[in-house]
Image (cartoon, grey):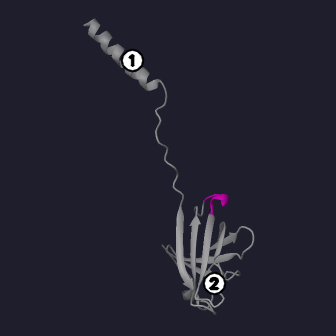
Amino acid sequence: MQLRSLLAGSAMLALLAGCASGPMEQPQEEEATAQASYQGSLPCRNCDGIDLDVTMMGEEMSAAEERTFTLNASYRNHPQNPPDENYEGNWEVLSGTPSNPDATVYELTPNGDGQIYYFLRIDESTLELIDPERRRFENGETLRLTRQ
């Protein structure tokens, strides 16, 4: 009986020793970066439209350096055939507009040269381009991007 207990105890110790010899390598899950992509076509005076594609990485509560974006603009059937515009930079969350103090506005600031873009968050799936004073344009419905 004692021999059986001794063997069982030894086996248990060997098993525990094997487990304690070092941490087992487990694949580490990378944190998923929040990403939202929006697309739309803006009116253009000299062409059929400006196709806009905006991808925002990070979350509103993320640190400033984690909130990045890419913006790509393509002109359709423009007589001068300008090159596509591609920007990268950081985005900020601003609160309020002159007509709605509770509104959420995203300010996209490109690295280097390029204009700052302001988008009013209409809902979870819609952004609307607004002016730097955070005012909506009269034709705001034509300045909307839809989440993809």
* Mark seen at residue 13: 1
- Looking at the picture, which amino acid does disc 2 mark? Ser
Q: Does the magenta segment cover residue 63?
A: yes
* Mark seen at residue 93: none
Q: Does the magenta segment cover residue 15?
A: no
Residue at the spot 58% in from the left edge and 78% down from the top edge: 52
The spot of residue 91 in percent (x, y) is 65, 67
Residue at which label 2 appears: 99
Q: Is residue 95 visible?
A: no
Could you say which is closer to the camera, residue 33 or residue 71? 71
Q: Quadrant of residue 77?
A: bottom right
Please state the extent of the stretch shown in magenta in the rendering. 62-67
Task: For label 1, count other residues whose C-alpha is less than 10 Å away and answer few (under 14), some (14-19) or many (20+).
Answer: few
Q: Residue furthest right?
A: 113
Cα separation between marks 1 and 2: 72 Å
- Looking at the picture, which amino acid does disc 1 mark? Leu
